[in-house]
Amino acid sequence: EVMLVESGGGSVQAGGSLRLACVASGYTYASNCVGWFRQAPGKEREGVAAIYNGGGSPHYADSVKGRFAISQGNDKNTVYLDMNNLKPEDTGTYFCAAEEAPIPSQCRRGTILFTNWGQGIQVTVSS
């Protein structure tokens, strides 16, 4: 069973930074994609970023390009989301997701369908 646990959320003022971490266990996928999503109250969940474990350029939503960076930890079981220059509209519950990725381009384009999800963690940005 794949388990994903997010950490690093919290409250910050606009312009500040946070680093989220997603620790995965129970993996048997040699090729995988890990993504970050967020959901604000009353809004649909949206993809934020995704990274393929075999390398290549990560995928970012237009709303976070140039401000957020997704990366793999050295242990290969942790994926980070560094969030800089945070804005109030970045507020929401952030979820980590993971999926086997036999077609890497789906991950790099942000079109992969994720079936494994974490519980989510709150990020609040005040103005």
Image: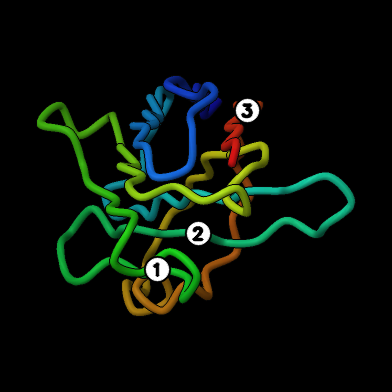
The quadrant the N terminus occupies is: top right
* Label 3 Cα neighbours within 10 Å, binned few <14 / some 14-19 / many ≥20: some
Q: Amino acid at mark 1?
A: Tyr
Mark 2 sits on what residue?
48
| On screen, residue 22 above or below 113 | above
Q: CA distance from mark 1 to mark 3?
A: 20 Å
- The structure residue drawn at horizontal position 46% and vertical position 76%, both measured from the top left corner, is 62
* Label 2 Cα neighbours within 10 Å, binned few <14 / some 14-19 / many ≥20: many
Along the polypeptide, which appears first: circle 1 or circle 2? 2
* Label 1 Cα neighbours within 10 Å, binned few <14 / some 14-19 / many ≥20: many
> In what element is the residue under mark 2?
strand
- The structure residue drawn at horizontal position 39% and vertical position 59%, both measured from the top left corner, is 50
- The structure residue drawn at horizontal position 43% and vertical position 76%, both measured from the top left corner, is 106
Q: Which circle marks residue 60 in the picture? A: 1
Q: Are marks 1 and 2 in contact (CB under 8 Å)?
A: yes
Classify residue 123 by image quadrant: top right
Q: CA distance from mark 1 to mark 2?
A: 6 Å
